[in-house]
Image: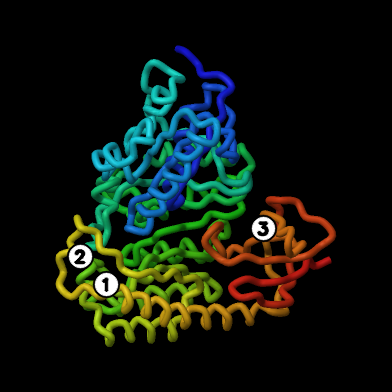
Amino acid sequence: MTKVMNKKIGVVSLGCDKNRVDTENMLYYLKDGNFEITNDYALADIIIVNTCAFIESARVEAIDTILDMAEYKKTGNCKQLIVTGCLPEKYRDQLVEGLPEVDAFLGVREYEKIAKVVGMSDQESEITDKRIITTPQHYAYLRIADGCDNHCTFCTIPSIRGKYKSVSEDNVLKQALLLEKMGVKEIILIAQDVTSYGKDIYGKPSLVSLLKKLSQYNFDWIRLMYCYPELVTDELIEEICTNSKIVKYIDIPLQHIDDGVLKLMNRRSRQADIVSIINKLRAKCPNIAIRTTFMVGFPSETEEQFENLCAFAKEYKLDHVGVFAYSKEDDTASAKIKGHLDDQTKLERVNVLGAILEENNREANEKYVGKTVKVLYEDIDYERNMFVGRTQYNAPEIDSVVYFTGDFADVGEFYNVKITAVDGYDLIGEIEQ
């Protein structure tokens, strides 16, 4: 086997945290090549762009990033530009024709070919779940499944990622053991739908059983992302609310609340089901943080249906909410629904709902002033001259943060911080002495 020695690789990972795990997996295939990973793309001999293709804006971002990286073939050291992930998985032929600047394309099921593509090996690597962690040492993502069987009418993920496929429990626990040995304090369980974990290999959803076993490891926090509402069972709620290792936080991608829109989206839950789940979570665990996403401007969404969504947002005041406009994807069932809304209407609805959510957040944050919270310290904001961290009620990269002061703090350690003020979505505080 030949090795490419002392070459620098720049990697751009776009899209969701599941894409990040793919990127980390790809880096593992390169571990024997004596490569140096660099964030300075001008110095990189090889640049890899791992792409997302979920919606149009993600594809635009991916193409723009590829073209930006292609400039380093003219102005930097780059000799090889490689594009991987969802975009070439779905649009390879168009990309080959339209992006001659790119030297190789690899889809989501081809990461094991990367060593051969960069000339490190004459053969493809064996498929593995091992990876090089790119998050800060104190937290890491743990993917427990890939693909999706939900077939929402607006979503392209099943056509890109395929059917739902759980990672075996033994494999998940082996990965958890490695993370424990690395000193990781927070593991974030991810899949397109974590609540369906195990249904394909054990005959029934087995997330609670997995959580009980993961809780035996030396992690401080276990976080759940992307829990589809219909499988947020009483058993799961009990486990989240009583297990001290599981943070009091749950991400439930609702998409909408109106029954008519939910039916057109091919979502199995209805408004009454969603309200019941929220009430159960808050009754069992009053301080739990609930994150979700709402899609506005779905085809045929009426003003009344949108107002229903707004009324729900005002009444239930979920803790973290992302809102985005429907994006028409030509190869999805929703593209054929009559009554597509114009872009201006969709933008107006995003802004109206966004203003409601902003007010909800302001009210929620003000309740923290004067209280002391446990904060995981992660970074320094040099402009503010303050430390930056998170509570258990905030996921990394997507939720708000706590800015705080103190004489000293170690990254990855926990501190009791007294909240003294609010700054938009974020909190301000100081370490309690």
Q: Residue 137 occupies which quadrant of the picture?
A: top right
Residue 232 at x, y percent in the picture: 37, 65
Residue count near mark 2 (Cα–Cα under 10 Å), binned few <14, some 14–19, many ≥20: many
Residue 392 at x, y percent in the picture: 59, 63
Amino acid carrying label 3: it is: Leu
The residue that label 3 is drawn on is 376
Q: From mark 3 to mark 2, how far is it between C-alphas?
A: 42 Å
Q: Are circles 2 and 1 on residues that touch, CB within 8 Å? A: yes
Residue at image point 39% right, 15% down: 122
Instruction: Identify the secondary structure beneath mark 1.
Output: loop
Residue count near mark 3 (Cα–Cα under 10 Å), binned few <14, some 14–19, many ≥20: many
Q: Which mark is residue 334?
A: 2
The residue that label 1 is drawn on is 298
Q: Is residue 427 left or right of residue 222?
A: right
Q: From mark 1 to mark 3, how far is it between C-alphas?
A: 38 Å
Q: Are circles 3 and 2 on residues that touch, CB within 8 Å? A: no
